[in-house]
Amino acid sequence: MIHKYPQDLVRSLLEKWRTPPMSREPGPRQFRDLPETSVLEELISTCYQASQMQEERRDISFRLMLAEPEEFGVQEGLLQGMFTLKMTDPIPYNTYELLKMVPALNYNNSLVGVRYREKDGLQIWGLIHSGSRWTQVIHGGSKQAAPLPGALGINVLGPGRLMVLRGLEILVQLTGGRIISPSMNVFQSNWMNARFSKVQAQLASLHAQNPLLVKNEWARIDPSFVGKLYLEFFKHMISTVRRAGHGGTILSFPAGMENIVSKDNPYISIKYRFSEGGANIQLKTLVLEIMQALATICGRLYGPEYVAGWNDYVALQGKRLAQLDEQVFKYARFVARLAGVDGAVVTTEGPELIGFGGIIQGNYEMGQHVAKALDPEGRSRQIERIESVGTRHRSCYYLCKKLQTVLAIVVSQDSKVRAVTWGEDTVLYWDVIPIDFAQ
């Protein structure tokens, strides 16, 4: 493997800057012009050097944006907690000044404001308070983030780890000497979408059969809405396990297998099983409630021919939708915390919660190799030996070989995440990093 460095990141940035946003949702597609390449290299290289340093034995993490103070819609943003603080005299942009300044800033809430002048070069002009809702891009959620201009942002995550953004949109990340973009996102793959399409169709059918449905008053629901809400749920669940620091495993069995895995079987022994019905189908119940509320609200506002989608859900969260939304993400955190005990959390694609403390049965013998996927669909692969992983990973590899329809999410104690399943002729896994959740 040839490692990548700041100059490589600049090249990737220049390739991706003028591409349309990856989000399929409507919205403004404006972006600012970038300075010349040498300025970008200085900007990113300085961040890279700062990331390798410590301030009083503390690792450095911070966010900055290359934009003028006038580019921020302060009046628009004040209601969502965004504001800027401009210093009377700009200070030089270098590793020394960043090292002294950024410990005073909260990574989730604030950015360093940087500008470029041909005469003065790069300078720090002040601070930008963005609020923390932008983190939902990574951790899942449905709250509206404070508006940011379509300018170049750089998030320094840790030693040698830089994330480059256009406003709130993640473009590319340098991590572990690799450059990764959202185009590598396994959660946006065709096979993953197909896996959960049955659930999406089932919920659409149940919604259409709602006895409270008023055909000439309820708006229609965009078919992609359920998939988007489920993705946010899973993002939040995985991020909760990751941030807990103890690791864990979540197993997703195909719909229809709940009768097998909820009883004694040769594949997995579940110490804490839940009875059928009730709260184990909590997410499905909540999503149907949300679809009903959204169809009612949008029908009243826009008429029965209107197709309500994710943007409407985010923008129209009055009392009822806000309550339901809060319950969705509380439930995600509840499920994630079940992974804190030994064994796996066992669900179906619904997802229906079967139980937790699941111990995979067998001798874990499956050969010496697995394949690492190098693209979202798993067509490009790299063969690896399995000696370097522990029992948690080996057991999931073994189960995915025995039951080739299982999807496993494995979180290590060091917060590394892998998605594992069967890939036609071998066990296949994807490394999952925060950028994989970008839209």
Image (cartoon, rainbow, N blue to C red):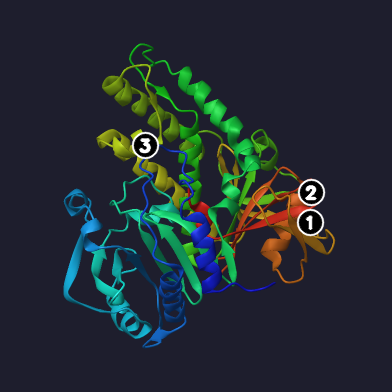
Residue at the bottom extreme, as displayed: 56
Nearer the observer, 293 or 352: 293
Residue 257: horizontal and vertical position, in percent? Answer: 68, 37
**Cα gap from disc 1 to disc 3, whole angstroms:** 46 Å
Residue in the picture at 49% in, 41% down: 230
Q: Earlier in the sequence, mark 3 or mark 2?
A: 3
Q: Secondary structure at mark 1?
A: loop
Residue 156: horizontal and vertical position, in percent? Answer: 42, 71
Residue with the mark numbered 1: 362
The quarter holding residue 25 reads: top left
Q: Secondary structure at mark 2?
A: helix
Residue 249: horizontal and vertical position, in percent? Answer: 60, 57
Q: Amino acid at mark 3?
A: Asn
Residue with the mark numbered 3: 311
Q: Amino acid at mark 2?
A: Lys
User: Is label 1 in contact with label 2 (beta carbons under 8 Å)?
Assistant: yes
